[in-house]
Amino acid sequence: MQRSPGSQTVAPSPLATRTRSESGDRRLIVMTRIPEAGRVKTRLIPVLGAAGAAALHARLLERTLATGGAHSETSPVTVELRYAGDTETPLPIADDARVSICRPQKGTGLGERLEAAVACAVDEHARAVVVIGTDCPDLTAEILALAWQKLQQADVVFGPARDGGYYLIGVKKSHRELFHDIDWGTSRVLAQSLAKCRQLGLSVALLPVLSDVDCPEDLITCRRIGGGIADALPRSIPGMLSVIIPVLNEVQNLESAITPLLNEPDCEVIVSDGGSTDGTAELAEQLGCRLIRATRGRGQQLNAGAALARGEFLLFLHADTRLPACFREEIGATLATGAIAGAFRFQLDQSGWCYRIIEWGTNLRSRYLQLPYGDQGLFLRTSDFFSLNGFQNWPFMEDFEFSRRLKRHGDIRICLSAAPTSARRWKRRGVFQTTLMNQVCITLYLCGVSPVSIAKYYQRWRK
């Protein structure tokens, strides 16, 4: 519930008059927009198109109402739908039996609209109000039941979203200040709201942290859930391999990485660009790759590429890593053993004993600790990737965390063939210094330092 769905107050329409019940102890308010192409899920339009983004929004709305309906079957809850948008566009659930009240939103910003919705419910004698959006497909009837339960002991209940906002807010009274002076649409929404509660002396309870679906990387959640939501996204094609390459200013390396893959049968190459300024994105399109303009950050870029992949298998490849000629056979043979994932043997493209020592140590770690990193070409089945909900949306350490999570679910096998990768990092800063810095970053992560802080530290070191 970070983003404001629009700034215009909706004019009265036939939709605005349907009210079957305006009383009840508990009011569940669903805030949404009419699914107009080009006006909803705007951050997904570059990857889904305007119509595709609107279709996804409609499916998310349907899922939210199904969740609310399932909850109302076991709890005395009145479900109210508050909508915004062009009333000339049909609202798919305008006559939905699960919705008791259907009204337009009032106000010129998200804060005003939330305040108006809560105040109206309280005026209509609701003793507890829970407000949700439609961007959180992981929301369940059980979590809604938990919200009411926590609201019995706390003044305010929040459902924290992983992006720093919240997917749910529950109150027993109208608190106007809760919805004002909040930087809607930023990662500061929940923190600012909690600070408001402290200022007002309101007790707070928190629900489980869930993911909103706003950006391309968030579509991983939709692919994991499947069902009607996934109908708006690509479907996996049996036997196809999707090679996903996250890039940022890799124009000098990209062509040599991609060229061997372009004529590979049943193979698609997805270049996930994080905002390159050197012509990398344009080159990817010229070469015939699928280009995705993703949020900058390796975890976000990898997830965005995977969410839109059509392959039965996924291969994550760095732009400065080269696959062996027999990579398809190696992938098939490795996964046929029952392994959950695999990676290629590590090799650097420079001669010298110091590089051989790095290779030896890396391959020892990969094989016996089952901890391959991103520059070894990690591969697995698409279904397994989605069931694990993909990478963390981190700018750093996303491959280390994912490998640790993977090996809890099965074996990670290392292929006999090597995937040579560039030694440019070691050459730039020195073999010893670079190796030491890698270990420092791992140690910081294991000690609980956030990946964002580690990434900043690493970038300062590189400069």
Image (cartoon, rainbow, N blue to C red):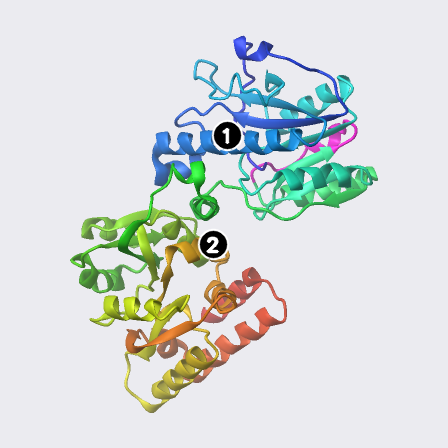
Q: Quadrant of residue 263?
A: bottom left
132 vs 357: above or below = above
Q: Residue at x 38, y 78 (%)?
A: 426
What percent of the width, then of the height, locates residue 57?
46, 32
Q: Residue at x 61, y 38 (%)?
A: 183
Asked whether, in this view, residue 91 is left or right of residue 379, the answer is right
Residue marked by disc 2: 387
The secondary element bearing badge 2 is classed as helix
- Decide whether residue 174 is among the magenta residues: yes
27 vs 343: above or below = above
What percent of the width, then of the height, locates residue 214?
49, 40
Asked whether, in this view, residue 37 is left or right of residue 461, the answer is left
- Decide whether residue 396 is among the magenta residues: no
Q: Residue at x 48, y 62 (%)?
A: 398
Instruction: Decide: few, some or many residues near mark 2? Use Cα within 10 Å; few <14, some 14-19, many ≥20.
Output: few
Residue marked by disc 1: 62
Amino acid type, callout 2: Ser
Q: Quadrant of the N terminus?
A: top right
Asked whether, in this view, residue 53 is left or right of residue 189, the answer is left
What percent of the width, then of the height, locates residue 111?
64, 29
Magenta stretch: dominant secondary structure: loop
Asked whether, in this view, residue 152 is left or right of residue 265, the answer is right
Is residue 381 or residue 425 the one in the foreground? Answer: 381
Is residue 426 or residue 462 the one in the foreground? Answer: 426
What residue range appears in magenta? 171-185
